[in-house]
Image (cartoon, rainbow, N blue to C red):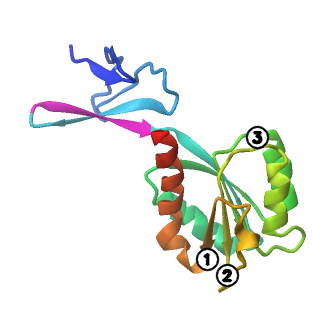
Amino acid sequence: RKRARCCGRSEPPHSICRSTRSAALPCADKSVSRLSWTIGRGRVSVRPVSRTLKCVVVDDSDDWLVLIRHALSKSSHSFEVVEFLDATEALGYLHDHKVDVVISDLQMPALDGQGFIHALRRFETRAPVVLISNRVSVPAETTRAATAFLRKDAIRRDLVRVIDGFFSAARTR
């Protein structure tokens, strides 16, 4: 029987699915919840499949919410996306729920992105925050509270790269 290495331990696979060649393994590292088996040339290679990341997106435009959701679908990570048109409603949700990443527009009617981030940090959340804006130039003090800043025209190209960077950096610590 083949043995797979997981978190430095050797574990026998449990119930291998014949169609997907996947095996669920007990694992001390909660970020590696499953191992995917790829059969090729007589070898079994094992690669971790990351857990679903919870992402809150706050923007007062439905069109941008759709574009961001689409961009996140292109990531190597799986996302559970919770969307809000109003920053105050998002704060209420974030007060009661733990999330992995927050994406917020800078310009919103009731509470702008900068005020939203400052209120969010009072919950002592360590979730990275990506601040997005249509503005061509944004003063550094405006974006200082955010983990990253992106112009909206760069979302398709750069959002996934930025978010993947957050989690690859967290894995190497």
- Residue 86 in sight: no
Q: Residue furthest left?
A: 41
Tell me: residue 170, above or below residue 69. Answer: above
The image position of residue 82, as x and y in percent, is 69, 53
Residue drawn at 51 percent across, 72 percent down: 156
Q: Are marks 1 and 3 in contact (CB under 8 Å)?
A: no
The image position of residue 66, as x and y in percent, is 62, 68
Tell me: residue 103, above or below residue 54. Answer: below
**Amino acid at pointer 3:** His
Mark 3: few, some, or many residues within 10 Å (few <14, many ≥20)? few
Residue 56 falls left or right of residue 150 = right
Callout 3 secondary element: loop
> Magenta span covers which residues?
42-49
Residue 44 falls left or right of residue 62 = left
Which residue is denoted by mark 2 in the rendering? Answer: 134
Viewer-nearest of labels 3 and 2? 2
Q: Residue furthest bottom?
A: 136
Mark 2: few, some, or many residues within 10 Å (few <14, many ≥20)? some
The disc, 1 or 3, on the residue closer to the chain's N-terminal end is 3
The disc, 1 or 2, on the residue closer to the chain's N-terminal end is 2
Q: Residue furthest front?
A: 141
Which residue is denoted by mark 3 in the rendering? Answer: 97
Residue drawn at 71 percent across, 65 percent down: 144
**Amino acid at pointer 1:** Arg
Callout 2 secondary element: loop
